[in-house]
Image: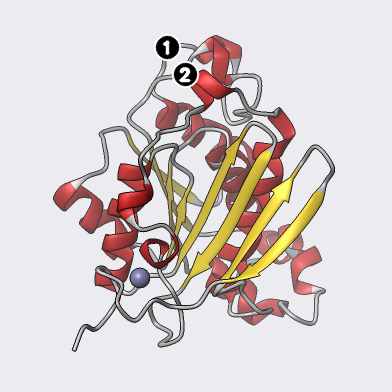
Amino acid sequence: MNDEQLLRYSRHILLDEIGIDAQQRLLDTCALVVGAGGLGSPAGLYLAAAGVGRILLADHDTVDLTNLQRQILHRQDRVGEPKADSGRRTMLEINPGIEVEALTRRLEGDALLEAVARADVVLDCCDNFATRHAVNRACVALRRPLVSGAAIRFDGQIAVFDPRRADSPCYHCLFPEAQDVEQVRCATMGVFAPLTGIVGTTQAAEALKLAGGFGTPAVGRLLLLDARSMHWHDVSVPRDPGCAVCGHPA
Ligand SMILES: [Zn+2]
């Protein structure tokens, strides 16, 4: 780290849990953020501000006026621009000392595997089950830690999966694909603006802990937030030995 970096990240370096070593690990980290929307906005902003050295920001959509109520990466004058490009600009405005790559094509198949393979930690900030399951399969196959988040109406959830650990469940252990009968999306259901901030920021916190190697990541737990009452529920989630994605059937 040079003098400017030591100053920029000094409030991290002052923390006993982080210090110079973990901050350097953050600078050496590549994080993949899938989705530059309500969750990807705060998650991406905090990863960038905190000094994650390389961020891959994936979103195939363009900025829409209805996004601006909560997707704080974007600006009114960028309506119609690719969200990944808009997000990249905002993140680099906050921290020009990192690298941000905008992935503007739909992340699937080989492109998804390639992006996950490059990442040290993956944040699922998308809004649909098909992508969630595809990202989970790629993370299990390539043994990459995954921080999953979701927000709809006033209900938020966060879960952390680490396929490097034998006791960690995966997203499929928790939400088998057969249960994904109904697609619930913000477009039809609405979402409370700061809820996406709370969930996305929590995802950033968990990703920074995983990448920096400090604290205790919330692996094997499902955090549920009811933002109407601001009550959090913390549910233990065991690994499913028969899981079709991460299980080892006899
Ligand atoms: Zn599983």
Q: Where is residue 6 in the image (x, y as percent from the top left)?
A: 71, 67
Q: In this view, does 114 lie to the left or right of 129?
A: left
- Is label 1 in a helix, a strand or a loop? loop
126 above or below 53?
A: above
Query: Which badge, 2 or 1, is on the more N-terminal residue?
Result: 2
Disc 2 vs disc 1: Cβ atoms closer than 8 Å?
Answer: yes
Which quadrant does the N terminus fall into?
bottom right
Q: Where is residue 13 in the image (x, y as percent from the top left)?
A: 75, 72
Between residues 71 and 97, which one lies in front from this camera angle?
Answer: 71
Q: Position of residue 14 (x, y in %)?
A: 82, 74
- Quadrant of the image where one finds ligand 1: bottom left
Q: Position of residue 15 (x, y in %)?
A: 80, 75
Kindly identify the residue that appears in the image at 39 percent across and 67 percent down: 173
114 above or below 111?
A: below
Q: Distance between the residues labelled 2 and 1?
A: 5 Å
Residue tagged 1:
80
Residue tagged 2:
63
17 above or below 61?
A: below
